[in-house]
Amino acid sequence: MFSQAGQPWSRAVVREVPADTVSWTPMQLDGLPGRSFALGAVAVDHIDLGSFLASIDLNDVEHLNVLRGMFENVALQDRNLLIMRVVGRLLDRDSLDISVVPYVLLAEGDVEINEHLDFSTSE
Amino acid sequence: MNILRNLFDFEREHTAGEVVFFKLFELFVAGAFVSLAWDWGMYTLRITEAVAPQGIGRYVDVGFMYGGSAPVVVAAAATLLLGLGYFRLWRYAYACALPLLHLLFVARFALGKLPHSSNMLGMTLLGLALAMVCFADDRSRRRFTLGFTYFFVGLGYVLAGASKLVGTGLNWADGRHLRLWIHEKSIDTLARAGAFELNTLQELALASRPAATLFLVTGLIVELSAFLVWWRRTRRAALTALIGLHAGIFLVMNIQFTLSVWELVLLALPWSTWLDRLLRETTWTNPLEQFSIRFA
């Protein structure tokens, strides 16, 4: 564990956002939209979600189904969940960059994907 | 004394406390895997596809584990086998439980990230399985299981430390790396709980590169010294240091290796000696002793 130090990491964060207010623009950690959504409270594994976002192609229907499956026990009535990928990396001697990219908006019966994402270079 | 005697010591007399401790230790191992089997199985019910196959899943299609009740069936079978093994009803029960547990593990963690919090316990279960198959007498089974566990605890942590030096180099312990990891784990807490707050140690590590470097150097030294578990004279100190390592990992990185820590606590402290005293001085422990002997 942690054998390769200094490498960028990738995680996922979910926020509950009002409908029709979603911006797909990358943001910083202190500018997260909406309100916090605790994945632990709904038994969604945040590590699974983070790894999944880093490695999949959301244009693939199968992968999208897997993502839906992760949230199948989450009640989405009157709720919109914005799933975002968070990437942290060392910049130079002492500074750190953490960027947040919105990936998917989950609502009851609907899934909206960030059209600006390029999954052909997923890492 | 040579290393084999330090690890296994098949010739040494066993005490009543040792017999009882081992049965309780075995209960911890078997019980933990019953819990893990159902945890993994129930979560697998929510997975529709193996996105990143792991373990046996890289060579065999484990798609049958998704979309039906297979995870529950496998978890039930593993539970039954662990029970048969614990109560000595079938000599090969633990050995048969291991592949089922592996199947549950790879099915559950096929979405990209493999944890290793259960690996050490898994090696102990392997030791139990080998002991049941290879030895007929209960004393040898106990000695082998514990010696096998001590060996792989020591080896595992040494390799963990060595992998850091191989994977990164001597600059692995640079405090900047710990800062990056603290932020990563803070995001994990944010995702899991909805909010996070840095504790004093984390703030110190983020504010002071020398302090962060010291944390990492200390942890690395403890890992690389874990081979001292192999000798009885240094075993307790080495195991206690590993417990301290995990305490530090929890405080600085918010990472819990609950099962590993409990196992280390069981291995580090002189439970057999305490149980010997308890068995001598009390009578209410008689049923426990009789149970342990009956299912030794």
Image: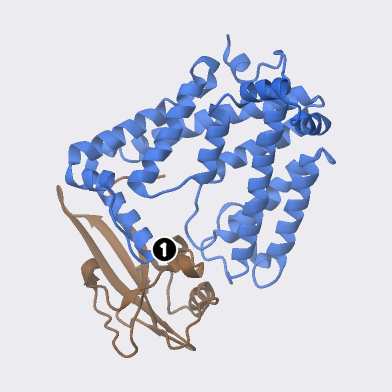
Chain colours: A brown, B blue
Q: Residue at x 35, y 44 (%)?
A: B251
Q: Quadrant of residue B88?
A: top right
Q: Answer with left or right where residue B162 lies relative to residue B201.
A: right
Front-lying residue, B251 or B85: B251
Compared to residue B146, the image places residue A76 above or below, namely below
Q: Which residue is drawn at 41% across and 49% down?
A: B255
Compared to residue B215, the image places residue B83 above or below, namely below
Q: In which quarter of the image is residue B184?
A: bottom left
Q: Residue furthest bottom?
A: A20
Q: Residue at x 59, y 70 (%)?
A: B46
The residue that mark 1 highlights is B192
The quadrant of the image that shows the N terminus of chain B is: top right
Is residue B22 visible in the rendered image? The answer is yes
Compared to residue A2, the image places residue B44 above or below, namely below
Q: Residue at x 68, y 35 (%)?
A: B24
Label 1 crowd bin: few (<14), some (14–19), many (20+), radius 10 Å = many
Front-lying residue, B199 or B255: B199
Q: Answer with left or right where residue B106 lies relative to residue B246.
A: right
Front-lying residue, B85 or B227: B85
Residue B99's spot in the image, x, y percent? 69, 49
Task: Please name the amino acid that badge 1 sits on.
Answer: Arg
Residue A47's spot in the image, x, y percent? 44, 60
The quadrant of the image that shows the C terminus of chain B is: top right
Residue A56's spot in the image, x, y percent? 43, 69
